[in-house]
């Protein structure tokens, strides 16, 4: 008789947008390999773009459930000049199921930002029959 066990581990889901970043939904998609939950986020722009007081704001959305994962959007702030993703508050229980599509939406852009990477540090749960 077999039983089902759960193996939980940390992994990273990465979204990469090469070239100029423009406003729009579905900029990049990642299919969830297993059930999981987003724990942290990070990101950077190789080319920050310009425009004093402007930023590039992003959202990660579950395409299957239409859930936005950030209650407060993380941003790339032109004035701070770090080229790093700043801020962003995840919703309570930012979970997803195996084979659901997580998509990168860009809500606002500075002038000509380019080459963006967003990383979601997650706990993934794999169910294995033994």
Image (cartoon, rainbow, N blue to C red):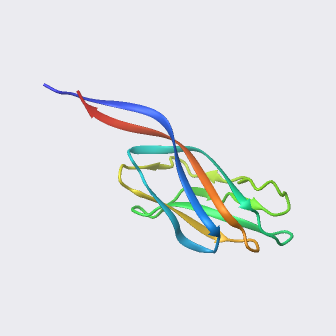
Residue located 63% across and 63% down the image? 58
* 107 on left or right of 3: right
Rendered position, 57 above or below 23: above
Query: Residue at image x 39%, y 62%?
Result: 64
Observer able to see residue 116: yes
Relative horizontal placement of residue 130, taking residue 99 as reference (left or right): left
Q: Is residue 29 left or right of residue 121?
A: left
Residue lying at the far left in this picture: please name it: 1
From the top left corner, tell me how far across and down residue 113 is, in percent. Answer: 72, 68
Residue 124 position, x and y percent, is: 44, 39
Q: Is residue 3 above or below residue 119?
A: above
- Total residue callouts: 0
- Residue 79: image quadrant is bottom right
What is the quadrant of residue 57 in the picture? Answer: bottom right
The residue lying toward the viewer, choosing from 93 and 10, is: 10
Which residue occupies 76% across, 63% down? 48
- Tell me the quarter of the image containing the N terminus: top left
Quarter of the picture containing the C terminus is top left
Question: Can you give x and y, in whole percent of width and height, for residue 68 in the image?
Answer: 53, 60
Residue 72: tell me if it is visible: no
Question: In this rendering, is residue 104 above or below 108?
Answer: above
Q: Position of residue 85 (x, y in %)?
A: 71, 54
Residue 84 vs residue 127: left or right? right
Residue depicted at 61% across the width and 68% down the height: 106
């Amino acid at each position: 008789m077999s039983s089902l066990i759960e193996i939980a581990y940390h992994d990273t889901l990465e979204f990469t947008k090469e070239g100029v970043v423009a406003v729009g939904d579905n900029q990049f998609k990642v299919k969830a390999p297993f059930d999981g939950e987003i724990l942290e986020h990070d990101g950077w722009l190789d080319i920050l773009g310009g425009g004093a007081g402007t930023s590039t704001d992003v959202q990660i959305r579950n395409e299957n459930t239409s859930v936005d994962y950030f209650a407060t959007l993380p941003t790339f702030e032109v004035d701070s000049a770090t080229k790093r993703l700043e801020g962003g508050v995840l919703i309570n229980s930012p979970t997803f199921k195996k084979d659901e599509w997580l998509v990168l939406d860009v809500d606002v852009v500075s002038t000509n930002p380019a080459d963006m990477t967003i990383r979601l540090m997650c706990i993934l749960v794999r169910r294995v029959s033994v």
